[in-house]
Image (cartoon, helix red, strand yellow):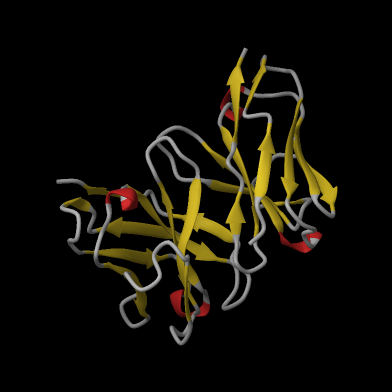
Amino acid sequence: EIVLTQSPGTLSLSPGEGGTLSCRASQGVSSTYLAWYQQKPGQAPRLLIYDTSTRATGIPDRFSGSGSGADFTLTISRLEPEDFAVYYCQQYHTPLTFGGGTKVEIK
Amino acid sequence: EVQLVESGGGLVQPGGSLRLSCAASGFTFSTYAMSWVRQAPGKGLEWVSGITNGGGDAYYADSVKGRFTISRDNSKNTLYLQMNSLRVEDTAIYYCAKETAAIGIPLFDSWGQGTVVTVSS
C-alpha cells in the first residue's frame, strides 16, 4: 500500500497570497494516478485536480498541480476567501489511498 | 446534474448492523463504478469499498473485509453498503462517491453529502 504524507499540516495564509502544498508518496506513483480534493467544513470533498495536473470541470486556473515520481505539489495562487479549506491528495492505483490532509487557514 | 443521496445512518451498538443506501440521479448509473468513503470525526478520508459498474466485482479495505458488503441495484439506481459486526472505530460519516470509469480507476468526481454512523454502547 502506498502511504501519502502531506505537508505542512496547516498552512496559514492571507487572502491574495499564494501557497504550495506537498504530497509525498512512500514509493513512486504514476503521474496518471494522482489527484487532489478540497473539503470545506460540513461539506463533502470536491475533486480539484486529477492525473497530477488536469483541473476538474469548473475549477479555476488559480489551482495547479505538478510533480512526478514520489513528490507532488498543489499550488494555489492568489487565495480567495472560498479557498480556505482542507486539501487531500489521493493516489488511485489500487489499492487507493489518501493523504492525511493540509488545512489552509486564514492568517 | 449528478446527485447522490445517502441514507440509513444512525446510532448502533457495537456488534450491530446497519444498511446504508445511496440514491443516484443525473447520470447513467449503470455505466460507472461506485465507492463508499468514510471520514471519522476530525480525521481524514478512508476508502471503504468499491464496486464495478455491473456489480460483478467488489473491493474492500482490509479494515472492513469480511464485515461489510457492497452491492448495487442498477434498475433502482441505488448503491448499498451492508455493515455487520460494527465496531466503535467504524464511527464516521460515510460518503457515496461516483468513480470516473466503469472499472479500475477509483477517482471520484462526485460525492454525496454523507450519512453519519455512530457505533456506541
At 33% across and 83% down in the image, what residue appears? Answer: B75
Q: Report x, y in % for residue B61.
A: 47, 65
Farthest right residue? Answer: A68
Q: What number of labels is visible?
A: 0
For residue A71, say whether it is visible.
Answer: yes
* B81 sits to left or right of B100: left
In the rendered image, the vertical position of residue A70 relative to residue B69, given as above or below: above
Q: Report x, y in % for residue A4.
A: 66, 48
At 32% across and 69% down in the image, what residue appears? Answer: B67
At 56% across and 59% down in the image, what residue appears? Answer: B108
In the rendered image, the vertical position of residue A20 relative to residue B104, given as above or below: above
In the rendered image, the vertical position of residue A22 relative to residue B11, given as above or below: above
Place residue A80 in its image quadrant: top right
At 84% across and 48% down in the image, what residue appears? Answer: A67
For residue B115, say whether it is visible.
Answer: no
Q: Quarter of the image for the C terminus of chain A: give it.
A: top right
Q: Report x, y in % for residue B48.
A: 44, 62
Q: Report x, y in % for residue B118.
A: 24, 47
Place residue A10 in its image quadrant: top right
* A6 sits to left or right of B21: right
Q: Quarter of the image for the N terminus of chain A: give it.
A: bottom right
* A58 sits to left or right of B73: right
In the rendered image, the vertical position of residue A45 relative to residue A34, given as above or below: above
